[in-house]
Amino acid sequence: MKSFDTSSAVESGGKNVDDDGGEKRTGTLMTASAHIITTVIGSGVLSLAWAIAQLGWVAGTVLLVSFAVIVNYTSRMLADCYRSPDAGRRNNTYMDVVRAYLGGRKVQLCGLAQYGSLVGTSIGYTITASISLVAIGKANCFHDKGHGAKCLVSNYPLMAAFGIVQIVLSQIPNFHKLSFLSIIATLMSFSYASIGTGLALAALASGKVGKTGLTGTVVGVDVTESDKLWKSFQAAGNIAFSYAYSIVFVEIQACILSTRDDTLSSSPPENIVMKKANLAGVSIATAFYILCGCIGYATFGNQAPGDLLTDFGFMNLTGSSILLMLASLSTLSELIRLLIRYTEFKPTREYSHEKANLAGVSIATAFYILCGCIGYATFGNQAPETSLLTLVFAQPIFQFVEKKCNKAWPESNFITKEHSMDIPLLGKCRVNLFRLVWRTTYVIFSTVVAMIFPFFNAILGLIGAVAFWPLTVYFPVEMHISQKKVKKYTMRWIGLKLLVLVCFIVSLLAAIGSIVGLISSVKAYKPFHNLY
């Protein structure tokens, strides 16, 4: 699935040109569905067991399904707005779509929400990466010294190391066009989530499970009354983060092959393909979420960890070195995906644990083979080359700032001049001083913020709350009203406005709950001194 690139099309002499003069798109229903699935199933899936623990079986499951229904409904509206008017020119970015239908300050608000979410996601991924590295370090310590050992690891050097790697990766021109990264990210996304589910099922088979309830955590037993309230709101934000893929929706649709034939139909086919892809993607992701979240909650109960894989809940439930190895493997998979996206216990001989080992290995391996092979079969050697968002969440920010600066100061050698350097083993590489300074500064900023606020659930909840309402609900609904010319105060208009209002209230409460969680965590936190 090739990205939109007008210059490439022009340079090719007009061959393989799409209807808008851009490079011929190759995206299909299958590749679009795969992009949605692999974008949705990210780090957010690891917090779902904790979220359901705060909300309980009823509210947790209902909220998961409700978010899925709302996302699918509003995304269908967004798909119809890809061209303006209905069968007109393409809008290849979210801001272009908003500009075409709403205009004015709403374009700037859209950009603020979209790029602000991307900055937050970069910070969130840095936090998750450091947690993954800490988990691997502690797993090695437990393996060498035993489960009762005092294994403390500082996450700050690990965050710094992750940041240094990102500084290097961020300097690679056209990093988003390294198509093999899509395959790796796909395999890593499915592998850690699948192994996590398999480990949870193995723990269930062992019989060592936590206490669950219809309403989740119990006031006076697990949490205080105020904690119950705020953590429930924060849990809603975590679920919202799990569905926060609207920031890439338009860019995925912009890669779909156009088979439009004006003699047969006046409706562009991209929206039809995207609606089907969205339904397939959201349905599969939701099924996966319910599986991971509910099985995780059934395993850990009201004491479910904030991060399903890296909070060592599995090590407390089982004494199996095989399961420990799988947990480390899944954590490593998560770390590799984050790098791309930002860019022995002595085994017991009890029969129940033998069954747990067999169940865990069998289920996790089956999931791994199933998801990995399906992911590769989907992309094959024609892995997508999406130029925005789906591989590295920082890339759109880099491109946005660099394009603005190039346009504002076209005569500045510092900004526009490319220097050629010979690097051993790599050959000639292009270096731009502005890109070097700007991208390095951005990575340092996101890394430092992550060091100051390394709180997984609270950060994810806040990002989800802030991004969900404007990008997933408000703008799609407002553009739909404008496009279809829905009259004020009709039943349809009232229903749409009510949907916007309800989602705004949920997002606001989720944001407040996440901020309260951040404040509570900061009070008991000493920056640059904590060990995990």
Image: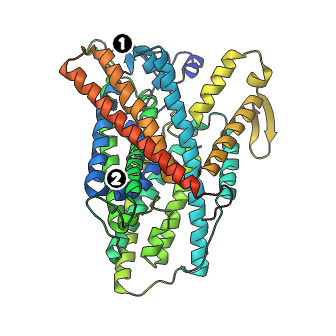
Compare residues 179 and 318 and report the one nearer the observer.
318
Give the residue pinned by disc 2: 288
In the drawing, does residue 530 fall left or right of residue 368?
right
> Residue 411: where, in percent of width, then height?
76, 15
- How many marks are shown on the rendered structure? 2
Indicate which disc, 1 or 2, sits on the residue closer to the N terminus: 1
Q: Secondary structure at mark 1?
A: loop
The reply to whether residue 48 is in sight is no
User: Which residue shows up at 27% across the image and 39% down it?
Assistant: 69
Compare residues 311 and 23 and report the one nearer the observer.
311
> Residue 95: where, in percent of width, then height?
48, 22
Query: Residue 82 appears in which quarter of the rendering?
Result: top left
On screen, 358 above or below 468?
below
**Mark 1, residues whose alpha carbon is within 10 Å: few (<14), some, or many (≥20)?**
few
The reply to whether residue 73 is in sight is yes
In the drawing, does residue 492 fall left or right of residue 135?
left
On screen, 282 above or below 195?
above
User: Which residue shows up at 34% across the image and 42% down it?
Assistant: 281
For the C terminus, the image quarter is bottom right
> Residue 530: where, in percent of width, then height?
64, 62
Q: Secondary structure at mark 2?
A: helix
Marks 1 and 2: CB-CB under 8 Å?
Answer: no
On screen, 251 above or below 359?
above
Give the residue pinned by disc 1: 85
Compare residues 100 and 495 and report the one nearer the observer.
495
